Image (cartoon, grey):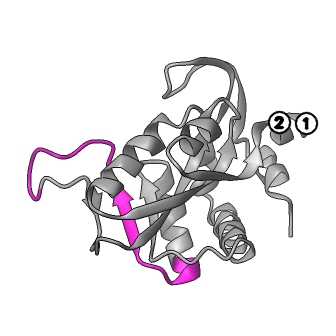
Amino acid sequence: MKPLADALKECGAIKFGDFMLASGKKSSYYVDIKKASTNPELLKLIASRVSEIMKLHSIKPDYIGGVALGGVPIAVSVSLETGLPLLMIRKETKDYGTKGQIVGDILPGREVILVEDVTTTGGSVIKAIHALRGEGLVIHRVITVVDREEGASGILASNEVELIPLVRMSELLKKI
């Protein structure tokens, strides 16, 4: 099976230029995991790698969670791969309908593993963790496709959550 870093490079997920990141930081490169998550073969590869990591680390959650928008297709594919129920976490609580931030049937006290497309500072995933914990769910780990290695691991650790990257940005930049 092809290394994920190579597959990401080949699909054009790494772009160079001037970019503003969700964290507010500027960067000379951008990791567009949506290029990968809209490609069925790459999405299946990502789901397979997440499933392998879960087995390797004996991670047995009750739910797979994905943060909108980038984490949702990954979470859906991992849910299909593992047979675990899916939770989708909106960035904000909606003002209409059920007014919920979490989509899916939840039972307090159960464990969620979050999957994310790219982590930089960890801001988006921390908000999702707080929303899930606010509903009584337990989160110990986040699996990210790419860790940009810009602080997410530390901020998550300070919230008692381990960040497990499938690929680190330093690995991707070596491949280019």
Q: Position of residue 166 (x, y in %)?
A: 73, 55
Q: Residue at x 49, y 44 (%)?
A: 159
Q: Relative to residue 74, is residue 49 drawn left or right?
A: right
Q: Residue at x 56, y 78 (%)?
A: 60
Q: Relative to residue 98, is residue 30 drawn left or right?
A: right
- Callout 1 amino acid: Lys
| In the depicted structure, whether residue 173 falls above or below residue 128 | above
Looking at the rendering, the stretch of residues picked out in magenta corresponds to 80-98
- Residue for badge 2: 170
Q: Position of residue 153 (x, y in %)?
A: 64, 41
- Residue for badge 1: 174
Quarter location, residue 58 = bottom right
For the residues bearing labels 1 and 2, Cβ distance under 8 angstroms: yes
Q: Relative to residue 87, is residue 102 drawn left or right?
A: left
Q: Is residue 92 magenta?
A: yes
Q: Mark on residue 138?
A: none
